[in-house]
Image (cartoon, grey):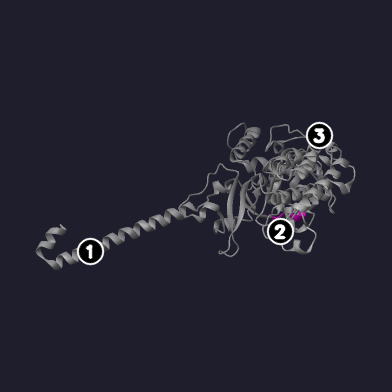
């Protein structure tokens, strides 16, 4: 058609070409709008992905506005053509902003894997109705335990009896008061009494304590007090956000100054867990390559507290070491029933050092230093990995390792968490 128009009139040809260009531009604009629409839809979390469809059987909602305003993003969102990551992961790398311009890395985590959450949800329905699906919240609200929580004015040891998390195996009233006073998913915290918690708040707290206490530990033991835990930044549904950490195992085989700095911090943390001004003794039941990690300034933190227990040294001899605890559905949300409860009285101070000497230090500092220094380190590592290590021997080895490692810690900007202070202090 275009060629025949041009044969009859040059003006007709010119008008035709203008019309053709206009139509092509309009088509491209439509394609762009469609692309923008697709991009916007890829930013739509949805209630299912966040776990909001299961609230109030979730962690909380304090970070939901951040998520929905795109002030918390998964890391691949910075490349707009990428879609949301798989919902099957338990941890995601993300970015967080307070002003929309400067972004900092964060970790977005689930209490447990999606499969474990689904198994727990099905277990609840099967426990009460022998069905695969039901109102998860409705079932848990009817339980005897939650009815006691609703009537209680204060969180007491009997209300957490039988929960499967190690952190509440030997609870003191002081620890439970700390949980209520510092629970970050409510507006009016500060009181040891639960009067400022709604029934919804109590269910969320109980659910979190029954599945994975990690976000609660980050809330009640903040870094501002000197605790070696990442910062808690909020939650939405069954996802919670904390400062980003790089696993300690990624530094295996590092140069001597880096290995020495990390090993020094690791041994210091182990010492602090049993010797702090707050009289809390933290102990590990398991340690692996993901237990510890560093933040951007080089500081070492405990990035996974799910296998961490606590004993309140201020209350003296524990009377909470219960032999036969009554269990219920809340005892079965993160483990098979009945859960296994190791005795509090069998926990020793040397336990943490033994686990670290077996699982982490050999890979971090073996074969790293000159022969004479390495020989001393290897000798202590062989001793401290012995299950029969006494508390006194553990303290001596900690002091010896700190003295050996200290001279190898260089003072420069790579270790931002102690620079430039280390220029003027004994580092």
Residue 272 seen in the current view: no
Which labelled disc corresponds to residue 417? 2
The residue carrying mark 1 is 19
The residue carrying mark 3 is 387
Q: Quadrant of the C terminus?
A: bottom right
Q: Quadrant of residue 95?
A: bottom right
Judge depth for marks 2 and 1 and give the one in front.
2
Dot 2: what SS?
helix
Q: Quadrant of the N terminus?
A: bottom left
Residue at position x 81%, y 34% in the image:
387
Looking at the image, the residue that sits furthest to the right is 316
Residue at position x 9%, y 63% in the image:
8
Contact, mark 2 vs mark 1 (Cβ under 8 Å): no
Residue 391 versus residue 131 in the image, above or below: below
Residue 280 position, x and y percent, is 83, 49
> What residue span does the magenta drawing correspond to?
180-186
Looking at the image, the residue that sits furthest to the left is 8
Mark 2–mark 1 distance (CA, rounded to whole Å) = 64 Å
Residue 291 versus residue 64 in the image, above or below: above
Residue 385 versus residue 281 in the image, above or below: above
Residue at position x 84%, y 48% in the image:
399
Residue 197 among magenta residues = no
Contact, mark 3 vs mark 1 (Cβ under 8 Å): no
Residue at position x 56%, y 64% in the image:
101
Residue 102 as seen in the image, left or right of residue 309: left
Dot 1: what SS?
helix
Mark 3–mark 1 distance (CA, rounded to whole Å) = 85 Å
Q: Residues within 10 Å of mark 2 (few under 14, many from 20)?
A: some
Residue 182 position, x and y percent, is 75, 55
Residue 30 as seen in the image, left or right of residue 374: left
Is 267 in front, or is 226?
A: 267
Task: Mark 2 or mark 1: name the one nearer the start of the chain.
Answer: 1
């Amino acid at each position: 058609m275009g060629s025949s128009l041009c044969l009859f009139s040059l003006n007709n040809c010119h008008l035709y070409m203008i019309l053709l260009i206009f139509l092509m531009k309009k088509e491209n604009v439509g394609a762009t709008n469609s692309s923008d629409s697709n991009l916007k839809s890829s930013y739509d979390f949805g209630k299912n992905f966040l776990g909001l469809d299961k609230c109030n059987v979730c962690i909380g909602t304090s970070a939901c506005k951040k998520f929905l305003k795109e002030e918390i993003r998964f890391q691949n969102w910075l490349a707009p053509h990428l879609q949301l990551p798989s919902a099957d992961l338990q941890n995601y790398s993300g970015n967080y902003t307070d002003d929309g311009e400067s972004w900092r890395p964060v970790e977005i985590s689930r209490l447990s894997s999606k499969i474990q959450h689904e198994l727990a949800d099905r277990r609840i329905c099967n426990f009460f109705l022998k069905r695969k699906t039901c109102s998860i919240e409705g079932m848990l609200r009817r339980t005897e335990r939650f009815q006691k929580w609703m009537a209680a004015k204060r969180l007491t040891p009997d209300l957490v009896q039988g929960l499967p998390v190690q952190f509440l195996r030997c609870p003191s009233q002081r620890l439970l008061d700390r949980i209520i006073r510092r629970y970050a998913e409510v507006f009016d915290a500060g009181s040891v009494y639960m009067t400022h918690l709604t029934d919804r708040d109590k269910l969320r707290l109980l659910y979190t304590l029954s599945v994975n206490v990690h976000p609660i530990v980050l809330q009640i033991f903040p870094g501002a007090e000197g605790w070696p835990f990442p910062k808690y930044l909020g939650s939405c549904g069954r996802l919670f956000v904390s400062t980003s950490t790089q696993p300690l195992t990624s530094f295996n085989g590092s140069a001597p100054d880096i290995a020495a700095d990390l090993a020094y911090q690791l041994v210091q943390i182990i010492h602090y867990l049993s010797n702090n001004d707050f009289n809390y003794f933290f102990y590990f039941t398991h340690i692996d390559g993901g237990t510890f990690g560093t933040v951007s300034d080089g500081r070492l933190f405990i990035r996974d507290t799910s296998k961490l227990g606590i004993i309140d040294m201020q209350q003296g001899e524990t009377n909470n070491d219960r032999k036969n605890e009554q269990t219920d559905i809340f005892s079965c949300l993160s483990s098979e029933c009945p859960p296994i409860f190791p005795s509090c009285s069998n926990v020793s101070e040397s336990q943490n050092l033994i686990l670290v000497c077996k699982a982490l230090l050999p890979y971090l500092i073996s074969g790293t230093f000159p022969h004479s220094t390495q020989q001393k380190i290897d000798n202590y590592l062989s001793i401290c990995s012995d299950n029969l290590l006494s508390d006194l021997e553990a303290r001596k080895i900690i002091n010896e390792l700190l003295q050996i490692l200290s001279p190898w810690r260089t003072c420069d900007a790579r270790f931002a968490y102690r620079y430039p202070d280390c220029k003027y202090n004994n580092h």
